[in-house]
Image: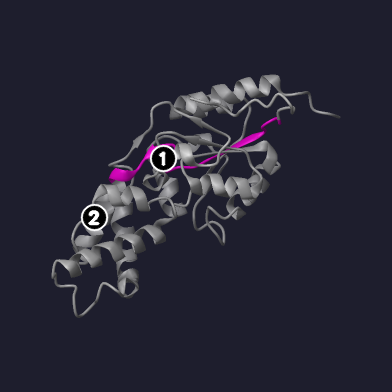
Amino acid sequence: MTTLPADPTAQPTSIQAVIVDLDGTMVDTLGDFEVALNRMLADLQLPPVQRGFIERAVGKGSEHLIRAVLAEQMRQADLSGGAVGASCPATLPEARYEQAWRSYQTHYLAINGQFSSVYPGVVAGLQALRDLGLPLACLTNKPLSFAQPLLAAKGLDGFFSHVFGGDSFARKKPDPLPLLEACKALGTAPARTLMVGDSQNDAQAARAAGCPVMLMTYGYNHGEPVQGVDADGLADTMTAVAAGLAARLQNAPPEKG
């Protein structure tokens, strides 16, 4: 595990708040995605999607996930000579998007949290961050109506003063807007607000917003190694994030009056 790097030529900036991603950062939700998406595909008489494809597609919001899965499975059905063929060619997945979205919402809300698990160290790490006196916000690209019940089901909702979903603002990560709005809600400057995520979406949004960013090594990152992402550090557990922040805060210079 590496923490936020210590730069001997510069004074460390005091972190005053933390923004935390949800899927792939706090909760492993691939099981929920797999069940809901495959029930959706069954409704549409399309072949089931493999978990590996879901892992590569997740992270940019449910709308993107559904469109990616729909296009892929319609292509698969077309290649195998399935019933999709003439009436709804694989080149027109958008024609079935609204039906797919309604089906997915129904199935996801019915099983939300049942096939997912909180990563080891998340609860202890969030508590340690709270013990440091840091306000926390959850910022995810998942729709808010999915995110809030999931946090509640996993006993994580009490840690956050604010929860923002992919539909809370006009744009999603990797756009910086959600981070900037979260910083406003927290009352902290971006440079003093740490983003903790698991993918290049989180890192790119943080860089554009001016927030320092830590990435978890166990997340999704669209199926790519997270070590190749431009971030300020990597952590194996949320408790390691808290420990690194505690050390950083202890070494921070006193605030100027």
Residue 36 in the figure: left or right of residue 245: left
The picture places residue 221, in percent across and down from the top left corner, at 42, 44
The picture places residue 249, in percent across and down from the top left corner, at 67, 24
Task: Give the quarter of the image for residue 48.
Answer: bottom left
Relative vertical location of residue 193 with respect to residue 121 in this rendering, above or below: below
Tell me which residue sits at (37%, 57%) in the image.
Answer: 65
Residue 53 in the figure: left or right of residue 27: left
118 drawn magenta: no
Tell me which residue sits at (52%, 56%) in the image.
Answer: 172
- Which residue lies under the disc numbered 1? 225
SS at badge 2: loop
Q: Residues within 10 Å of mark 2 (few under 14, many from 20)?
A: some
Query: Given the image, on which type of amino acid does mark 2 rest?
Result: Val
The picture places residue 245, in percent across and down from the top left corner, at 60, 26
User: Who is closer to the viewer here, 246 or 75?
Assistant: 75
- Asked whether residue 5 is in view, the answer is yes
Tell me which residue sits at (56%, 58%) in the image.
Answer: 169
Tell me which residue sits at (31%, 75%) in the image.
Answer: 92
Magenta stretch in the rendered image: 13-31
Colouring: one colour
21 drawn magenta: yes
Query: Given the image, on which type of amino acid does mark 1 rest?
Result: Pro
User: In the picture, which quadrant includes the C terminus?
Assistant: top right
Which of the marked residues, 1 or 2, is nearer the chain's N terminus? Answer: 2
- Which residue lies under the disc numbered 2? 49
